[in-house]
Image: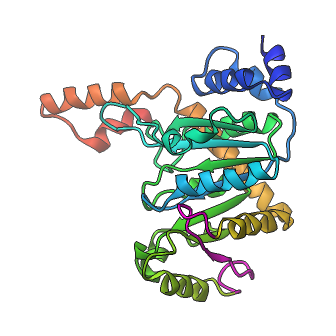
Amino acid sequence: MWTNLLTELQSGNVKALARCISLVENEVVGYEQILKNLPASSTPIVGLTGPPGAGKSTLADALIEVLVAQNKKVGVLCVDPTSPFNYGSLLGDRIRMNQWYSNPNVYIRSLASRGSLGGLNPKIIEITDVMKAAPFDIIIVETVGVGQTEVEIAGLADATVVVLVPEGGDEVQAMKSGLMEIADLFVVNKADRPGTDDMVRNLRSMMAPGFNNDRRTPVIKASAAQKTGIDEVLTGILEFLQIPATNDKKLWLLAEKAYLLIQQKRMKDISKIQLKQQIEEGLNAQSFNLYGFIEKYR
Protein backbone atom coordinates (compact mmCIF):
# COMPACT_ATOMS: atom_id res chain seq x y z
CA MET A 1 0.00 0.00 0.00
CA TRP A 2 2.63 2.53 1.08
CA THR A 3 4.83 1.87 -1.96
CA ASN A 4 2.00 2.88 -4.30
CA LEU A 5 1.26 5.93 -2.15
CA LEU A 6 4.89 7.05 -2.30
CA THR A 7 5.02 6.65 -6.06
CA GLU A 8 1.84 8.67 -6.50
CA LEU A 9 3.06 11.25 -3.98
CA GLN A 10 6.29 11.82 -5.91
CA SER A 11 4.35 12.13 -9.17
CA GLY A 12 2.31 15.01 -7.76
CA ASN A 13 -0.92 13.22 -6.91
CA VAL A 14 -2.65 15.57 -4.45
CA LYS A 15 -4.92 12.85 -3.05
CA ALA A 16 -1.89 10.67 -2.29
CA LEU A 17 -0.20 13.62 -0.55
CA ALA A 18 -3.29 14.31 1.58
CA ARG A 19 -3.57 10.62 2.43
CA CYS A 20 0.08 10.35 3.46
CA ILE A 21 -0.18 13.41 5.71
CA SER A 22 -3.29 12.00 7.40
CA LEU A 23 -1.64 8.61 7.92
CA VAL A 24 1.41 10.24 9.49
CA GLU A 25 -0.46 12.78 11.62
CA ASN A 26 -2.78 10.11 13.04
CA GLU A 27 -0.05 7.45 13.32
CA VAL A 28 -2.03 4.90 11.35
CA VAL A 29 -0.41 1.45 11.27
CA GLY A 30 2.30 1.41 8.58
CA TYR A 31 2.98 5.16 8.61
CA GLU A 32 6.58 4.59 9.73
CA GLN A 33 7.26 2.62 6.55
CA ILE A 34 6.27 5.69 4.55
CA LEU A 35 8.67 7.86 6.54
CA LYS A 36 11.56 5.38 6.31
CA ASN A 37 11.27 5.27 2.52
CA LEU A 38 10.94 8.99 1.80
CA PRO A 39 13.47 10.10 -0.84
CA ALA A 40 16.07 12.76 -0.12
CA SER A 41 14.86 16.25 -1.05
CA SER A 42 16.31 19.75 -1.18
CA THR A 43 12.97 21.58 -1.37
CA PRO A 44 13.36 24.68 0.83
CA ILE A 45 11.09 25.24 3.82
CA VAL A 46 10.23 28.84 4.68
CA GLY A 47 8.84 29.46 8.16
CA LEU A 48 6.57 32.39 8.93
CA THR A 49 6.33 33.22 12.62
CA GLY A 50 5.52 36.16 14.84
CA PRO A 51 2.95 37.38 17.35
CA PRO A 52 -0.83 37.07 16.89
CA GLY A 53 -2.33 39.58 14.49
CA ALA A 54 0.94 40.35 12.71
CA GLY A 55 -0.56 39.29 9.37
CA LYS A 56 1.26 36.00 8.78
CA SER A 57 -1.62 34.43 6.86
CA THR A 58 -2.10 37.52 4.72
CA LEU A 59 1.63 37.62 3.99
CA ALA A 60 1.60 33.91 3.08
CA ASP A 61 -1.31 34.57 0.73
CA ALA A 62 0.58 37.44 -0.94
CA LEU A 63 3.75 35.34 -1.30
CA ILE A 64 1.72 32.52 -2.90
CA GLU A 65 0.37 35.00 -5.46
CA VAL A 66 3.87 36.12 -6.46
CA LEU A 67 5.21 32.55 -6.62
CA VAL A 68 2.26 31.29 -8.69
CA ALA A 69 2.79 34.18 -11.10
CA GLN A 70 6.32 32.79 -11.57
CA ASN A 71 4.80 29.35 -12.32
CA LYS A 72 6.12 27.84 -9.07
CA LYS A 73 4.44 24.99 -7.24
CA VAL A 74 3.81 25.93 -3.60
CA GLY A 75 3.00 23.78 -0.59
CA VAL A 76 1.60 25.50 2.50
CA LEU A 77 1.19 24.20 6.05
CA CYS A 78 -0.85 26.41 8.40
CA VAL A 79 -0.86 25.55 12.09
CA ASP A 80 -3.79 26.79 14.18
CA PRO A 81 -4.04 26.65 17.98
CA THR A 82 -5.81 23.80 19.71
CA SER A 83 -7.94 24.54 22.76
CA PRO A 84 -6.32 23.03 25.90
CA PHE A 85 -9.83 22.44 27.25
CA ASN A 86 -11.82 20.76 24.48
CA TYR A 87 -9.00 20.02 21.97
CA GLY A 88 -10.93 21.78 19.20
CA SER A 89 -9.32 23.99 16.56
CA LEU A 90 -10.81 26.56 14.19
CA LEU A 91 -8.32 25.99 11.34
CA GLY A 92 -9.25 29.46 10.13
CA ASP A 93 -6.16 30.22 8.03
CA ARG A 94 -7.82 28.46 5.09
CA ILE A 95 -10.45 31.21 5.00
CA ARG A 96 -7.81 33.82 4.14
CA MET A 97 -6.32 31.65 1.39
CA ASN A 98 -9.50 30.31 -0.20
CA GLN A 99 -8.71 31.75 -3.64
CA TRP A 100 -6.05 29.02 -4.10
CA TYR A 101 -8.24 25.97 -3.45
CA SER A 102 -8.68 25.11 -7.11
CA ASN A 103 -5.21 26.18 -8.28
CA PRO A 104 -3.20 23.10 -9.36
CA ASN A 105 0.08 24.78 -8.36
CA VAL A 106 -0.95 25.33 -4.72
CA TYR A 107 -1.59 22.83 -1.95
CA ILE A 108 -2.72 24.13 1.46
CA ARG A 109 -3.08 21.95 4.54
CA SER A 110 -4.27 23.20 7.92
CA LEU A 111 -3.03 21.46 11.05
CA ALA A 112 -3.99 21.82 14.70
CA SER A 113 -1.20 22.48 17.20
CA ARG A 114 -2.60 19.64 19.39
CA GLY A 115 -1.16 21.16 22.54
CA SER A 116 2.33 21.86 21.22
CA LEU A 117 3.77 24.99 22.88
CA GLY A 118 6.16 25.90 20.09
CA GLY A 119 3.60 27.16 17.58
CA LEU A 120 3.70 23.95 15.55
CA ASN A 121 2.05 20.54 15.26
CA PRO A 122 3.63 17.58 17.13
CA LYS A 123 4.08 15.79 13.78
CA ILE A 124 5.33 18.84 11.88
CA ILE A 125 8.79 17.37 11.21
CA GLU A 126 7.35 14.24 9.64
CA ILE A 127 4.64 16.12 7.72
CA THR A 128 7.11 18.59 6.20
CA ASP A 129 9.32 15.69 5.11
CA VAL A 130 6.28 14.13 3.42
CA MET A 131 5.59 17.46 1.70
CA LYS A 132 9.21 17.64 0.54
CA ALA A 133 8.75 14.33 -1.30
CA ALA A 134 6.06 15.93 -3.48
CA PRO A 135 7.14 18.05 -6.48
CA PHE A 136 6.91 21.48 -4.82
CA ASP A 137 9.36 24.29 -5.54
CA ILE A 138 8.93 25.78 -2.07
CA ILE A 139 7.08 24.95 1.15
CA ILE A 140 5.72 27.63 3.49
CA VAL A 141 5.02 26.79 7.14
CA GLU A 142 3.00 29.29 9.17
CA THR A 143 3.08 28.93 12.96
CA VAL A 144 0.22 29.46 15.38
CA GLY A 145 0.94 32.98 16.57
CA VAL A 146 0.97 32.39 20.30
CA GLY A 147 3.35 35.10 21.46
CA GLN A 148 6.75 34.33 22.95
CA THR A 149 7.17 30.59 22.43
CA GLU A 150 7.32 30.17 18.66
CA VAL A 151 10.98 29.30 18.32
CA GLU A 152 10.66 25.65 17.25
CA ILE A 153 10.32 26.84 13.66
CA ALA A 154 14.04 27.70 13.67
CA GLY A 155 14.85 24.00 13.96
CA LEU A 156 12.59 23.15 11.03
CA ALA A 157 12.82 25.89 8.40
CA ASP A 158 15.66 26.64 6.00
CA ALA A 159 14.67 30.31 6.24
CA THR A 160 12.74 31.81 9.15
CA VAL A 161 10.76 35.00 8.53
CA VAL A 162 9.66 36.87 11.66
CA VAL A 163 6.61 39.04 10.97
CA LEU A 164 6.09 42.06 13.25
CA VAL A 165 3.83 45.12 13.25
CA PRO A 166 4.69 48.77 14.03
CA GLU A 167 2.66 48.77 17.25
CA GLY A 168 4.31 45.57 18.44
CA GLY A 169 6.43 47.41 21.01
CA ASP A 170 9.93 48.81 21.25
CA GLU A 171 13.19 46.97 20.69
CA VAL A 172 13.27 45.70 24.28
CA GLN A 173 9.94 43.93 23.73
CA ALA A 174 11.27 42.47 20.49
CA MET A 175 14.35 41.12 22.27
CA LYS A 176 12.23 39.73 25.10
CA SER A 177 10.11 37.71 22.71
CA GLY A 178 13.06 35.45 21.83
CA LEU A 179 12.44 35.98 18.12
CA MET A 180 15.59 38.03 17.56
CA GLU A 181 17.86 34.99 17.58
CA ILE A 182 15.83 32.90 15.14
CA ALA A 183 15.07 35.49 12.43
CA ASP A 184 16.77 35.17 9.06
CA LEU A 185 14.55 37.97 7.80
CA PHE A 186 12.34 40.51 9.55
CA VAL A 187 9.16 41.80 7.92
CA VAL A 188 7.49 44.83 9.47
CA ASN A 189 4.00 44.25 8.12
CA LYS A 190 1.13 46.74 7.96
CA ALA A 191 3.73 49.35 7.04
CA ASP A 192 1.05 51.93 6.26
CA ARG A 193 0.52 52.39 10.00
CA PRO A 194 2.28 54.99 12.19
CA GLY A 195 5.53 53.95 13.85
CA THR A 196 6.79 51.77 11.01
CA ASP A 197 10.00 53.71 10.41
CA ASP A 198 10.85 53.73 14.12
CA MET A 199 10.32 49.97 14.34
CA VAL A 200 12.49 49.36 11.27
CA ARG A 201 15.24 51.65 12.57
CA ASN A 202 15.29 49.94 15.97
CA LEU A 203 15.46 46.47 14.43
CA ARG A 204 18.24 47.43 12.03
CA SER A 205 20.33 48.96 14.81
CA MET A 206 20.02 45.75 16.81
CA MET A 207 20.81 43.53 13.84
CA ALA A 208 24.19 45.06 13.07
CA PRO A 209 26.98 42.61 12.12
CA GLY A 210 28.53 41.05 15.19
CA PHE A 211 25.17 40.65 16.94
CA ASN A 212 23.89 37.90 14.70
CA ASN A 213 26.59 35.66 13.17
CA ASP A 214 28.43 38.52 11.43
CA ARG A 215 25.46 39.00 9.14
CA ARG A 216 23.05 41.89 9.15
CA THR A 217 19.57 40.42 9.25
CA PRO A 218 17.45 42.22 6.62
CA VAL A 219 14.47 44.24 7.81
CA ILE A 220 11.82 44.82 5.13
CA LYS A 221 8.73 47.01 5.23
CA ALA A 222 5.62 45.51 3.67
CA SER A 223 1.87 45.67 3.65
CA ALA A 224 0.52 42.26 2.78
CA ALA A 225 -3.05 43.52 2.58
CA GLN A 226 -2.02 46.28 0.17
CA LYS A 227 0.32 43.90 -1.74
CA THR A 228 3.31 46.24 -1.29
CA GLY A 229 6.82 45.10 -0.47
CA ILE A 230 6.02 41.45 -1.24
CA ASP A 231 8.54 41.16 -4.08
CA GLU A 232 11.23 42.50 -1.72
CA VAL A 233 10.26 39.95 0.93
CA LEU A 234 10.47 37.06 -1.54
CA THR A 235 13.80 38.34 -2.87
CA GLY A 236 15.14 38.49 0.70
CA ILE A 237 14.02 34.91 1.33
CA LEU A 238 15.55 33.58 -1.89
CA GLU A 239 18.81 35.43 -1.28
CA PHE A 240 19.09 33.89 2.18
CA LEU A 241 18.41 30.42 0.78
CA GLN A 242 21.38 30.91 -1.55
CA ILE A 243 23.74 31.32 1.42
CA PRO A 244 25.43 27.95 2.02
CA ALA A 245 24.58 26.60 5.46
CA THR A 246 27.58 25.53 7.52
CA ASN A 247 27.97 21.82 8.15
CA ASP A 248 27.80 22.52 11.88
CA LYS A 249 24.45 24.26 11.54
CA LYS A 250 23.04 21.40 9.46
CA LEU A 251 24.21 18.90 12.05
CA TRP A 252 22.65 20.87 14.90
CA LEU A 253 19.34 21.13 13.02
CA LEU A 254 19.31 17.38 12.37
CA ALA A 255 20.26 16.73 16.00
CA GLU A 256 17.37 18.94 17.12
CA LYS A 257 14.95 17.05 14.87
CA ALA A 258 16.27 13.70 16.11
CA TYR A 259 15.91 14.86 19.73
CA LEU A 260 12.28 15.89 19.20
CA LEU A 261 11.43 12.64 17.42
CA ILE A 262 13.01 10.55 20.20
CA GLN A 263 11.17 12.65 22.79
CA GLN A 264 7.87 11.90 21.06
CA LYS A 265 8.59 8.16 21.02
CA ARG A 266 9.43 8.05 24.71
CA MET A 267 6.35 10.09 25.64
CA LYS A 268 4.06 8.00 23.46
CA ASP A 269 2.41 6.18 26.36
CA ILE A 270 1.65 9.40 28.27
CA SER A 271 -1.90 10.66 27.74
CA LYS A 272 -2.94 14.16 28.80
CA ILE A 273 -6.51 12.97 29.21
CA GLN A 274 -5.39 10.23 31.63
CA LEU A 275 -3.17 12.69 33.46
CA LYS A 276 -6.15 15.03 33.88
CA GLN A 277 -8.30 12.19 35.25
CA GLN A 278 -5.61 11.10 37.72
CA ILE A 279 -5.05 14.69 38.85
CA GLU A 280 -8.79 15.11 39.34
CA GLU A 281 -8.88 11.97 41.51
CA GLY A 282 -5.97 13.26 43.58
CA LEU A 283 -7.57 16.67 44.04
CA ASN A 284 -10.86 15.09 45.10
CA ALA A 285 -9.00 13.01 47.69
CA GLN A 286 -7.19 16.17 48.82
CA SER A 287 -3.90 14.34 48.50
CA PHE A 288 -2.54 15.84 45.29
CA ASN A 289 1.00 17.15 45.02
CA LEU A 290 2.28 17.85 41.49
CA TYR A 291 5.88 16.83 42.19
CA GLY A 292 4.89 13.67 43.99
CA PHE A 293 2.45 12.92 41.16
CA ILE A 294 5.09 13.02 38.42
CA GLU A 295 7.58 10.93 40.39
CA LYS A 296 6.07 7.68 39.10
CA TYR A 297 6.75 8.74 35.49
CA ARG A 298 10.50 9.16 36.00
- Name the colour scheme: rainbow
Residue under the point 63% across and 75% down: 220
Residue 106 in magenta stretch: no
On screen, residue 45 versus residue 188, left or right, reads right
Residue 157 appears in the figure: no
Residue 222 in magenta stretch: yes
Give above or below for 5 relative to 151: above
Q: Quadrant of residue 103?
A: top right
Residue under the point 46% across and 69% down: 177
Magenta span covers which residues? 209-228
Q: Where residue 67 sits: x, y (%)?
A: 75, 52
Q: Nearer the viewer, residue 15 or 58?
A: 58
Residue under the point 47% across and 62% down: 54
On screen, residue 4 versus residue 184, left or right, reads right
Q: Where residue 139 sits: x, y (%)?
A: 72, 46
Q: How many marks?
A: 0
Give above or below for 188 relative to 266: below
Q: Nearer the viewer, residue 75 or 242?
A: 75
Q: Where residue 5 sits: x, y (%)?
A: 79, 18
Residue 15 appears in the figure: yes
Q: Quadrant of residue 183?
A: bottom right
| Quadrant for the C terminus in the image | top left
